[in-house]
Amino acid sequence: MLLGPVFSVEMVTSSRRTRYFAVRALYGSVLLLAFWMVYESHFGYYTARTTDIASVANFTAAFFNAFAVLQLLAIALLGPAMAAGTIATERERRTIEYLFVANLSNLEIVFGKLAARLLQIVSLVLVGLPILALAMLLGGIAPEALVVAFLITVSTVLAVATLSIAVSVWSARAREAVTRAYLVLLALFLVPPILSMLQYQAGAIYDKLLAPINEHLLASNPFWILQSVLSGASASGYSPAWQTVGILLRNHLMLSVGALVAATIAVRPVHLHQTGLAPKRRRRLMHLLRPKPDNHPMLWKEIFAEPAASRLGLVGRIALAAIVLGVLGPTLYMFVTTVGNYGLNDTESFQTCSLIMGSVVGCGALLLIAARAAGAVTSEKERACWDSLISTPLSPHQIVLAKILGNIYALRGAMVILLLIWGMGVIVDTAFLKVVPFLLGTLLIVALFAGSLGVMFSLWCKSSLRSMGLTLVVGVFFGGAYLFCCVPVIFLEGGEELFLAPCVPFLLAFPGVLYMEGARILEYDPELVAAYVLGNLAYLVTALLLYGGSVGNFDSLTGRTGRYAFHPDGPPRSPEIMVAEVVDTDE
């Protein structure tokens, strides 16, 4: 029986968790806010439109388009967090052995977990049904559009859940499983649309090399299919959309079946492989070049002893490589085209491309910094080495600062990519060099905030998964998602430029935009300069406050008592001994 005891236990335990109720309430509030925003754009104070039947139908159609996109966004953003930690959490808590010794097959374990998480995601999606029914009372939504959106939503839920479960089977910890699942979805949903931009620039090169693969990837992208179907429906009817939706359903079904079969076959062998092999000590070139700990043992541990990319696993590395190639590919092509064919005369298009790609890479790097910092303390507790760390004479200032700086240093690869993109901009236009320090400074300031935020939540929370969720929700909201809530207030009250101050994409791109459009911005929108300066100062001050709060509450949050909590100097001990006590054995 597939829906056996695992499914029953999962439904009972997950239904009692308060965070799922909070997520549903938040999702419903977002949909209601979207309903009000679309209404304001059609019948607001400044629109001066008459409320006839045609305008009401246009309003409901516009809301339905926004509703369908938000529904897919909720599945893509919240689905991995709900499903990717199932098997990994059992392995992390050492309770998966009890499932193996019970009279349960692999299919019952995996399918029971999958069915319970599918119901949780479906219950989230059903929150929007009453809101959509409210809009349908006004008319303007075709039944065919409802069927198309329903089919795309169901296939996306199934694909995201099964893919997350499969990633969880090959992950040792829940935090690693969630990170890998997000990387895979980001590669599947973001890279194909970026590569499709080369179709208008590369022409024959795109058709010969990328088109065959990218067309299949785009056919599996629910956002791409949804927009193409809804936009083409208004002009040419729904007859050509069914074939496109059918291809999407076929691809998602094949992906789901393949992921489910792979997870079912591998759930026991993977666990036995991970627990039956001794950890390997990897001797790398950097191990020979790294300095001695000296007077900063904690910082040395975070920089040289903590693994960064190795925790992504093979799937995570492939997804990360696809994202990097998807970002660098169009940028390199634009650079070669600008330098080779136009003789450095057409620089505006390349500078625009470099600013967009730099902002994308910067935002992704900041999210990874925040996610990694969210497990800075909780991962130490999960590896049972936190007690050894706080028993050393290291002060809270040394521990917290090393955790923050170590997380920033761990993503030095993203910094190399950014420097490469900015370097190409300098080659195209040497005057762009004076913009690079501002771009780099803004990135470091926001990275300091992301690291401080993650470490603070890691100190407060008991598990890495909960800490990561809170860190990403707070960081994404204040980093730019708040604009979704503030847009109506902006246009009703005025002063919209200052609302951009906390927006991270705006801060990462504004120095380049100011360089390209300096005269016009200084003449017509000088508030944008004030917003950029205010945003950098706000993130810097907030990062310092978060750091101070983490250091000040370190002893109370960690339960550190005794003379070492207040006298960090303690008895003299060599840094090598202190580091040896806390460095993980499988570095």
Image (cartoon, rainbow, N blue to C red):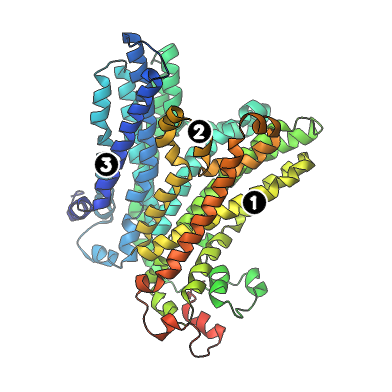
As rendered, which of 88 and 262 lies closer to the eye?
Answer: 88
Could you say which disc has been placed on residue 495 in the image?
2
Left or right: residue 445 versus residue 73 is right
**Picture coordinates of residue 518, whole percent (x, y):** 69, 34
Q: Amino acid at mark 1?
A: Leu
Disc 3 is placed on an element classified as helix
Q: Is residue 375 visible?
A: no
Residue 66 against residue 184 in the figure, above or below: above
For image coordinates 44% across by 77% down, the residue present is 389
As rendered, which of 105 and 508 lies closer to the eye?
Answer: 508
The alpha-carbon separation of the residues under discs 1 and 2 comes to: 28 Å
**Picture coordinates of residue 366, whole percent (x, y):** 52, 51
**Picture coordinates of residue 298, whole percent (x, y):** 53, 74
Res. 175 image quadrant: bottom left
The alpha-carbon separation of the residues under discs 3 and 2 comes to: 30 Å
Q: Is residue 544 visible?
A: yes
Crowd tier of the residue under label 2, counting other residues whose Cα lies within 10 Å: few below 14, some 14–19, many 20 or above? few
Dot 3 corresponds to which residue?
Answer: 25
Left or right: residue 121 versus residue 335 is left
Mark closest to the chain's N terminus, 3 or 1: 3
Count up the numbered dots.
3
Res. 553 image quadrant: bottom left
Q: Name the mark nearer the viewer: 3 or 2.
A: 2
For image coordinates 28% across by 37% down, the residue present is 28
Q: Name the mark nearer the viewer: 1 or 2.
A: 2
Q: Amino acid at mark 2?
A: Gly
Could you say which disc has been placed on residue 440 in the image?
1
Residue 176 against residue 66 in the figure, above or below: below
Disc 1 is placed on an element classified as helix
Q: Dots 3 and 2: beta carbons under 8 Å?
A: no
**Picture coordinates of residue 161, whole percent (x, y):** 34, 45
Q: Amino acid at mark 3?
A: Ala
